[in-house]
Image: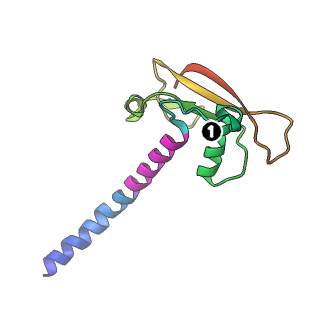
Amino acid sequence: MAPAVARVLFLQLVLGPTLVVDIKVQIAIKNFRMLHIDYPRVNYPEGFQGYCNGLMAYVRGRKQSWYCPQIHYMVHAPWREIKSFCLDSDSFCENYNEYCTVTEDSFPVTICSLASGQPPMSCHYNDTLTNQRL
C-alpha cells in the first residue's frame, strides 16, 4: 500500500503545478475567444444603435465591469485560422514585452472606439470595419 501512496503523492507534487498552469492557459484562451473572436459576425438589434454598442455591452458584462474601455478589437475569422498562429512564436515583440506573431494574411477586424465627450458611464462607441494583419 505504501508504494501506491508514494506514487500518488509523487504525481500530485510533479504534475499538480502543470495541471494548474494548463487550466489557467485554457481559461485565458476561452476568455480571448469570447472577447475578441466574432465569427460569423453577429447582427445586433437596432436598439443597440450599432454593432460596437451591442458588442461592448456584452464585453462589459462578460468582464463584469461598468468601465467603458477606450478601444476594443474583434476579429471576424474562424478560431481554427487564428489558433494556428498562436501555437508558438520565435519572435520577441519589444512593444508588448513578450513573444508574439504577426500574420502574413489580413483578417476582417472591427475596431470599437469610445466616442468622445460623454458622461463617464455612458458608453457609446464608433465602429470601423477593416482588414488587418494580426
Residue 54 image offset from top left, x and y in percent: 65, 39
| Stretch of the chain drawn in magenta | 21-35
Q: Is most of the magenta stretch helix, strand or loop?
A: helix
Q: Residues within 10 Å of mark 1 (few under 14, many from 20)?
A: many
Image coordinates of residue 42 in percent, x first then y, are: 54, 33
Residue projecting furthest to the front: 46
Location of residue 60 in the rendering, given as x and y in whole percent from the top left corner? 65, 48
Residue 119 or 47: which is nearer the viewer?
47
For numbered disc 1, what is the local secondary structure? helix
Which residue is located at x 19 percent, y 71 percent? 7
Observer-nearest of 34 and 9: 34
Q: Is residue 30 left or right of residue 57?
A: left
In the rendered view, would you say 128 is above or below 88? Answer: above
Judged left or right of residue 118, residue 125 is left
Q: At 50% across and 47% down in the image, what residue appears?
A: 31
Percent x, y of residue 55: 62, 39
Question: Left or right: 62 with respect to 66?
Answer: left
**Which image quadrant for residue 6?**
bottom left
Tell which of 81 and 16 is nearer to you: 81
Residue 103 belongs to magenta span:
no
- Image quadrant for the N terminus? bottom left
Residue 11, picture quadrant: bottom left
Q: Which residue is mark 1?
A: 55
Scheme by which the image is coloured: rainbow
Query: At 46% from the left edge and 22% from the top edge, which residue is drawn?
Result: 103
Position above or below: 7 against 97: below
Name the kind of residue labelled 1 in the image: Leu
